[in-house]
Amino acid sequence: MSIVDKFKARIQGVKSVVLTTHVIPDADGIGSEISLCLALRSIGIKAICLNDEPLPQRYRYMDPDGVVSGSDEFHPETYGPVDLWIVVDTNTVDRVCPRLQPLIHAKNNVLFIDHHPAAHLKDPERHCVDTNAAATGQLTGTIIEGLGVKFDRKLALPLYTAIIIDTSSFRYPNVSASTHHLVGDLMETGITPSEAYNGIYGAKKIDHMHLLGTILSTAQATKNGDIAWIHLSKNLIKRFDSDVEDTHAFINHLLILDSIKVACMFRDDGDVLKVSLRSSGEWDVGLLARHLGGGGHSHSAATIIKKDPNESVEALIQKTVEKMEAILPTLKV
Ligand SMILES: [Mn+2]
């Protein structure tokens, strides 16, 4: 069954929906839920989006109608019955806001719309999961078109942003002709690349620029240049008083290196080291992340490594890079 047919089957007779996404949501999750929420409202379904927190300021340009609320503003008694929970950009209830998890489990009617690997899903035929989709925003756009809802600017801008963010501006191999066809349809509404791009990327403060400059000036690479990395240390985060969520895109700058295969960003977070991985296209960093106990897409993945109090972070990074170098030849897509 196609993604669209599955979606239509799941909303049969549904009058009320609550949408959510994973905690610490990104623009793909946020853009997808906003757009789908508006589309469902336009076909007469009661819908809201609930996240773990209210929408951060930098994403508000996508939500002029304010369809997203923080979960603590939600009162199930006054809202009334929820027929269906829709979770976008993840495929496990464990990753959504802890306050919502019991409500979702109690209803026992959840629909995942997602593009991450979902081998654990017991009933994949009931969910809209396609790991080939470049973004959840792409799946969401396909579903909205399949419902016969016409895009307008309010639906299009969040989806366009979702796709720009998850493809790092159309650079990854999972960007397909259908991604661009959908983007064409979104642009027919009159939205422009610059308003999405400026909205999502063009809202930084000068401190952010200085942090980026400092980080990039300490970038390192293996001798042959296959692997390059940056380290966002505790001191740097503190020194620039930066919002950690704002640093996710730093890693992408490494992908412009001429012989890069795998880019890494190490970030200190308490007693763990968070490791983000990006691929130049031909190397499967999802597989690499799984070797290191994490997971993700072939072009974008992550893992977490426990720090050893008896070892410096620098030594841990060095060791991890050596491990990556050893595995690298097996990662060719
Ligand atoms: Mn995504």
Image (spheres, rainbow, N blue to C red):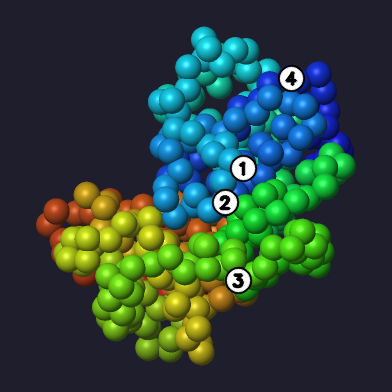
Q: If you read the primary sequence from the N terminus, does the residue marked by circle 3 or circle 1 appear first?
A: 1
Query: CA gap, disc 4 to disc 2?
Result: 25 Å
Amino acid type at mark 2: Met
Image mark for residue 62: 2
> Residue at the left extreme?
310
Q: Position of residue 307 (x, y in %)?
A: 23, 54
Query: CA gap, disc 1 to disc 4?
Result: 18 Å
Q: If you read the primary sequence from the N terminus, does the residue marked by circle 1 or circle 4 appear first?
A: 4
Image mark for residue 34: 1
Q: If you read the primary sequence from the N terminus, does the residue marked by circle 4 or circle 2 appear first?
A: 4
Q: If you read the primary sequence from the N terminus, does the residue marked by circle 1 or circle 2 appear first?
A: 1
**CB-based contact (under 8 Å), mark 1 and mark 2:** yes
Q: Position of residue 130 (x, y in %)?
A: 72, 48
Identify which residue is drawn at 51% across, 89% down. 258
Amino acid type at mark 4: Lys
Image mark for residue 15: 4
**CB-based contact (under 8 Å), mark 1 and mark 4:** no
